Every structure is written in C-alpha cells, then in structure tokens.
Image (tube, rainbow, N blue to C red):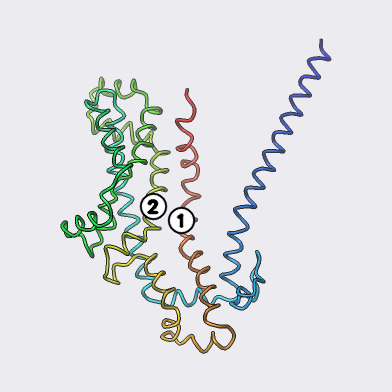
Amino acid sequence: MARTRKRKVIQETFSDRLFVVLDWMLLLFLLIIVLIPLLNVISCSLSEPAAVGGGRVFLTPKGFSLTAYQSLLEEKTIMTGFFNTIFYTVFGTILNLIVTLSCAYPLSRRELLFKKPLMFFFSFTMLFSGGMMPTYLLIKSLGLLNSRWVMIIPGAMSVSNMIIARTFFMNTIPQELTEAAEIDGASDYRLIFSVVLPLSAPIIAVLTLFYAVGHWNAFFSCFLYITKPELFNLQVVLRNFIANTRALMDSNGLTESIAAAQDAALFQEVLKYAIIVFTSIPILLIYPFVQKHFVKGVMIGSLKG
C-alpha cells in the first residue's frame, strides 16, 4: 500500500515537472516570435540604409547610425505633434474613464429600471454606425472641426469597454457590500468614491491602457477632421514626414551627407523603422506600470468564486 502511494506521488511529481517544462518551452517559443520582429525593427532603425536595403540586417545593427532619429528630432513639427498626442491621450483617456465608469456602474445594479432595453440600445451602436459622411456633417454642425476636442469628445466612450467594466462590477463587487454601505447611510457619491472605485483598480488600469493606446495611435480622425498643422497629432505628422522625406532632407541640409553614402530611397526605409520605434516607446514604457492590474483585470470574471 505504501509502495503504491509512493509510486503515485512520484508519477504526479513527474507529470507536474513535465507540465512546467512544456509550459516554459511554449512561453519561450512565444517570446521568440514576439522578440525577433521587435529586435529586427530596432536594428534596422539603427543601421546604415545600404545594409537595410541589402537585407543584411537581422537582430543586430549593421553600420551603427542614428541619422534617422536625428532627422526625426530636428523636425519641429514632430515635437509639436508629440505634445499634441500627449494632450489628446491624457485628457481623452480621463474623459473616457469618467464616461465609461459612470455608465457601467448603474447598468451593473439590479435595481436599475429598464436595464435590458438600455443595454440593447448600447449594443445596437456596436453593429451599426452613421457612416463617414453623416458623421463628418455632424462634427461640422457641432463646430468641432479644427478643434482639439474633436479628438476627445466624439469617442468619449467605447461600448465594448463599458460592457467589460459592467461585467467587472457585477462579478467582483458584491451587492451585499453596497447594501451594507447604504444601510450605514452612505450616499450614492460616497458609495462610488469610497467603496466602488477603490475596489476597481484592475479594471481602471485595463480601461486606461485600452483607451490610451487608442488615442496614441489615432490617425484617421485627425486626418479627417483637422487641417491646421499646429493641431496635428504625431501619427499624421509622421505620415506627412514620410511623404515629404526628400523635401525635408533638403530643407534640413541632410541631402549631401546622406546622398554621399546611400540613396534617399533607402534612407526612407530606415526612417520608417525609426518612426515605428519612436511611436512605440511611450506605450512600452507605460505598460510595465499597469501590467499587474492589467492581468488581474482581464482575468477577473473568467473564474467564479
């Protein structure tokens, strides 16, 4: 009997170790899939145009060069677009959180009247939209064209994110807890700010990351509704920068130094890699600070208990 039990423990230990080994192998494989393209992009942005055009760059730079980054930083419009993007991202994300949480929490309460019809109307907007031209005419009639608010107000709430937040409130914050707070005399505002929001850090981190990435990568709205260069965000500025690379190099006096060694077309390819790195760094720097809450917020609701 003792031998059978010992053999069973050994088998369980072996199976656990095998699972851990296979799990690490899978994670390592996924890491390689993600890391190789990232390192290749960084290496291409730091390499000479001739090496990139010849396909000789892989994982490590060939002929280290910062010319592409120098060209980006010397362009004044890029810094203007960078600060505009920060403005749109910060204030847009704050408005997104306020509107989304203000909508999601009431819809998570059992006592809310007409909750199902309201959810139907919200979900309906995920299937159908007014279209580009009617939306443009609406934005124009509201006086939001060529305004900073056109990048913030029209997308004040994502219905899918609101549903995620509502599910979090329903599955995570017990109804008994809110009822106990109400019995103790807590008002609705006191209940939200003292009970609900402190317990909602994971979902707030998830929504912050989702909305911030959306604002940071926004291109079409700015391209469609804004024509003033001083209001362009970073994505539109970089698009214009790529489209006019030759003219910008001439104006910055870079033609001679670059054309002496590489063709301008090859430099444009390196410039594209540098732009990818330049626009990705802020989001990559933010993610580690919200990673713990992000993982927790995504997983809450998948387990019951």
Nearest the camera: 68 or 117? 117
x, y percentage for residue 85? 35, 62
- Horizontal side of residue 24 vs 280, given as left or right: right
Tell me the residue at 48%/65% (across/down). Answer: 278
Image position, residue 168 (x, y; %): 39, 32
Q: Callout 1, which amino acid?
A: Ile
* Above or below 290: residue 189: above
Image quadrant where residue 6 sits = top right
Residue pointed to by mark 2: 212
Type of amino acid under label 2? Ala
Residue 88 percent coordinates (x, y): 32, 58
Q: Residues within 10 Å of mark 1 (few under 14, many from 20)?
A: some
User: Residue at the top extreme?
Assistant: 1
Question: In this rendering, is residue 206 above or below 42?
Answer: above
Residue positioned 38% across, 32% down in the render: 167
190 or 220, nearer to the observer: 220
Q: Circle 1 sits in a helix, a strand or a loop, which is it?
A: helix
Q: Are marks 2 and 1 in contact (CB under 8 Å)?
A: yes
Q: Residue furthest right?
A: 3
Give the left or right position of residue 11, taking residue 75 as reference. right
- Secondary structure, mark 2, is helix
| Quarter occupied by the N terminus | top right
Say which of 150 and 88 sits in front: 150
Query: At x 28% / y 30%, what residue is drawn?
Result: 191
Q: Which mark is residue 246?
A: none
Marks 2 and 1, how far apart in space? Answer: 8 Å
Rendered location of residue 277, percent (x, y)? 51, 64
Q: Look at mark 1 in the image and give the residue it sits on.
A: 283
